[in-house]
Image (cartoon, grey):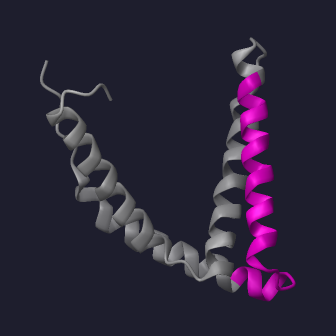
Amino acid sequence: MKQPQPDLGFVPALQEALRTAQKGFDAYNRAAFPRRPPEFFALELAGEAGEVANKEKKVWKGRDIPLDELADEAADVVIAAVNYANARGIDLAAAVGTKLHEIERRRLADLQDGKAI
């Protein structure tokens, strides 16, 4: 069975949106909150990701977790990741674009080598 070829044409628009969002987050945080080191945001990110994992574990066990609760936790992860990147001076737009292209390169290499994806 032939695998569909994904289109990475969305990457430039995603990068533009990320640049705008990252700058907006930075301006908002500088105006509204005390300055915090990258380590603070790394710990916050780990905690928020843990909250997503905990909710999903409950879903896996059969509990009915409302989608808005999952969405709220996912939003916390994104916010913490952007705050971490800003505190560390990471250009998310560049990093995400590079990573998406690397994922696709690896996927194609795995397909060529006959590896399961």
Taking the spot 79% from the left edge, 80% from the top edge, the residue there is 37
Q: Is residue 84 left or right of residue 69?
A: left
Could you tell me which quadrant the C terminus lies in? top left
Q: Is residue 88 left or right of residue 21?
A: right
Q: Quick one: 105 or 26, which is closer to the camera? A: 105
Residue 41: percent from left, percent from top = 76, 68
Q: Which residues are magenta?
A: 28-57
Residue 29: percent from left, percent from top = 75, 80
Q: Classify residue 76 by image quadrant.
A: bottom right
Relative vertical location of residue 46 with respect to residue 53 in this rendering, above or below: below
Relative vertical location of residue 42 with respect to residue 104 in this rendering, above or below: below
Taking the spot 12% from the left edge, 24% from the top edge, the residue there is 2
Relative vertical location of residue 68 with respect to residue 86 in this rendering, above or below: above
Taking the spot 82% from the left edge, 70% from the top edge, the residue there is 40
Taking the spot 55% from the left edge, 73% from the top edge, the residue there is 21
Residue furthest to the top: 62
Q: Quick one: 114 or 93, which is closer to the camera? A: 114
Q: Is residue 52 left or right of residue 2?
A: right
Residue furthest to the right: 34
Q: Main secondary structure of the magenta part?
A: helix
Residue 23: percent from left, percent from top = 57, 82
- Answer whether residue 53 is magenta in the image: yes
Relative vertical location of residue 33 with respect to residue 103 in this rendering, above or below: below
Q: Classify residue 25 by image quadrant.
A: bottom right
Q: Classify residue 28 by image quadrant.
A: bottom right
- Answer whether residue 77 is magenta in the image: no
